[in-house]
Amino acid sequence: MGHATFEWVYVGVVIALLVYVGAASWDVERLLDHAPPESKVVKVFGQQWLWTFEHEDGRKEVGELHLTKGVPYRFEITSRDVNHAFNIPDLTVMMDAVPGRINTMWVMPDATGEFLIQCREFCGFSHYQMRAKLIVEEPDATNVAFEDAEEKYLPASSVVDAGDTARLS
Amino acid sequence: MVLEVKKPRAMWEILFSTHHTDIGLLYIILAITALMIGGALAIAIRSELFLPGNQGIIPDSNTFHRIFTTHGTNMLFLWLLPFAAGVGNYLIPIMVRYKDMAWPKLNATAFWMIPPAMAMVWLGMADFTWYASPPYSILKAPGPAAEMWIFGIKILGISSVLGAINFIVTILKMKHPDLPLMRTPLFVWATLVTSIMILVAIPTFAAALIMLYTDRLGVSGFFNPAMGGDPIAYQHLFWFTFHPEVYIFAIPAIGMMYELIPRFSRKPIFSYQSGVTAFVLLAIVGFASWAHHMYSTGMSFTEKTVFMIGTLAAVPASAMHVFNWTATMWGGRIRFRAPMSFAFGGLVLFFYAGAGGIVNTAMPLDFLTHDTYWVVGHFHLFVMGLITFAFIGMLHYLFPFITGRMYNERLAMISFWLLFAGSSVIFLTQHVLGLYGQPRRTFDYLPIEPLIIMNQISTVGAWINAAGAALLIGNLITSAIKGKPAKMNDPFELGEHYYDYTRREPHH
């Protein structure tokens, strides 16, 4: 094979791989970006150097966040001073908290337990200690989970395979 | 100190010279100095992170922030940029067959702006990270340090714009009339493309720096939400300059690889045209991807998609370079002297870096890796792996040209293996740390087992790197003073023409 043919084949293979990566991530991100309309809103405030939360019913929490398993939540994230980033590593929640802006991200916890909440954007002296605790509880009488949540919020229709579902939930 | 073998010259003659090789020498000495002192800061950071809790190496988190800010600023603007300019000064006039740079005095001016800027960055030691993001940088960052950083970077920006203008004019106007641009070495193309990118990219951040400064003074509120400004606007301006800046750092290194790999493989370049095409493609597409640093700032789905496509579009160009190098080496009689080893090591680490970069580009995966140690490992594989390795390889290749002497090959090879092993260990481990969720720019981490183990491996890698760097600099300094005189026509016994070393004698 001549110089040019060989190189064009190689470039073609690279481009095909990139198109696959791009299409696959477009597909997943589409779901991540559009929160289900029934999801409960939790307002998240970052400030130097702690997290405060406000639920739909007006309950406020500092440094701890109680959520219910199987309920979709939409976080409305903002900051009271400098930039922060609201991050729950185990649930792949990651969104900057920017003063003057409200950023949203949604999640549906699928396991009970305690998870780490941390700040992932540099915010000053105690950035490394800016943590909070996420506590996911079993649904009880006051807080009912949607029974068919999985089917409802993760359209199995066309594009999402099992791997994506696990990541999304 | 005498730096020339044939004709010893006093230090001040070199300092006040406007000859391109003298300016090149000054650039390179300054850059190597910055590499070593910036590296010392990195060792301090890694040693502090060896165990969770305060190890006492860095007293508190504020000092830690000052150290990593200075480390980053120093390595990018005082090591990478000046070194590329230094090698360009040495080689560009020779490659385009002109007696000097187009404007020798402008050239000297551009160099002599760097030492005061370096003093400001180092004496100030700002604490707001190398990207100085508001509102922290305008509301909370302490005192003169921030202003000194802003003006230091400002001066460095002007210096690199002056240097870029000089390179463009030298290449396009002073090129020998018998030498078509398509016959010049690829390093000339690399410098030309880089210089044009500097002219396009730098002014944006120059404006943002002024806005940042007036915001700090309180007379404006461009980025201050309390005055109706928008911190995200700064990030757009910043990354519009500094994403192309990644290519401004990388393209000269790629050009140097094109000098080293064909010579030491003793084969012509596989495809000159594809090298030129890839340079030009990178330079254009490099401007279409800046906001991939900002996926998590709350961009809309459409914006994210557009910038993901822009980022992916830059990959084939880089892949073409890797292909070109590999195909050049294929079937060549490769001589693994130190310059070739560094170039090959750079190629390997470049591959890792590029593969990691595709993960960052994919939108959902970026939310896993963004602002974690993954990103630290990823971009260090570029700046340390590809760029610094190519630079160090080129430094060894130019060593006979600069000093007239040979370095010690055995020590150089030992330092290569130390640096290659060290860099792989540090930065590949940091990818894993990122997946465990350790945020970057943190003074301390949770005392859980995987984090401790990975941090310790990474720190040991840093110590290996420190040993390699110490050996490297020791070898270069002692060889410059009392190394064996080099065979100047073909110091590496490649059967190829070496650079025209008689050009080292200044003519004015």
Image: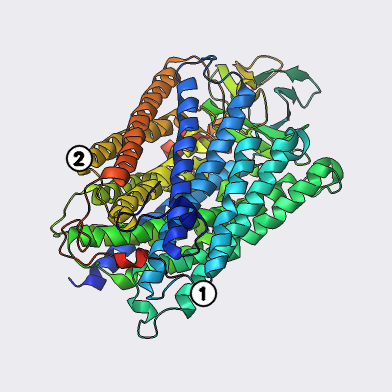
User: Looking at the picture, which amino acid does disc 2 mark?
Assistant: Arg
Q: Give coordinates of residue B92: x percent, y percent.
A: 41, 68
Q: Give coordinates of residue B452: x percent, y percent.
A: 43, 18
User: How many neighbours does mark 1 have within 10 angstroms: few (below 14), some (14-19), or many (20 or more)?
Assistant: some
Q: Nearer the viewer, residue B105 or B126?
A: B105
Q: Chain of mark 2?
A: B
Determine whether, in the image, residue B7 is placed left or right of residue B103.
left
Query: Mark 2 vs mark 1: which is more N-terminal?
Result: 1
> What residue do we see at 34% from left, 51% from top?
B395
> What residue do we see at 72% from left, 42% from top?
B147
Q: Nearer the viewer, residue B205 or B304?
A: B205
Q: Is residue A90 visible?
A: yes
> What residue do we see at 68% from left, 39% from top?
A104
| Residue B410 circle label | 2
Q: Give coordinates of residue B403: x percent, y percent.
A: 32, 53
Q: Is residue B278 visible?
A: no
Residue at image mark 1: B169
**Which image quadrant for residue B91?**
bottom left
Q: Nearer the viewer, residue B452 or B17?
A: B17
User: Looking at the picture, which amino acid does disc 1 mark?
Assistant: Val
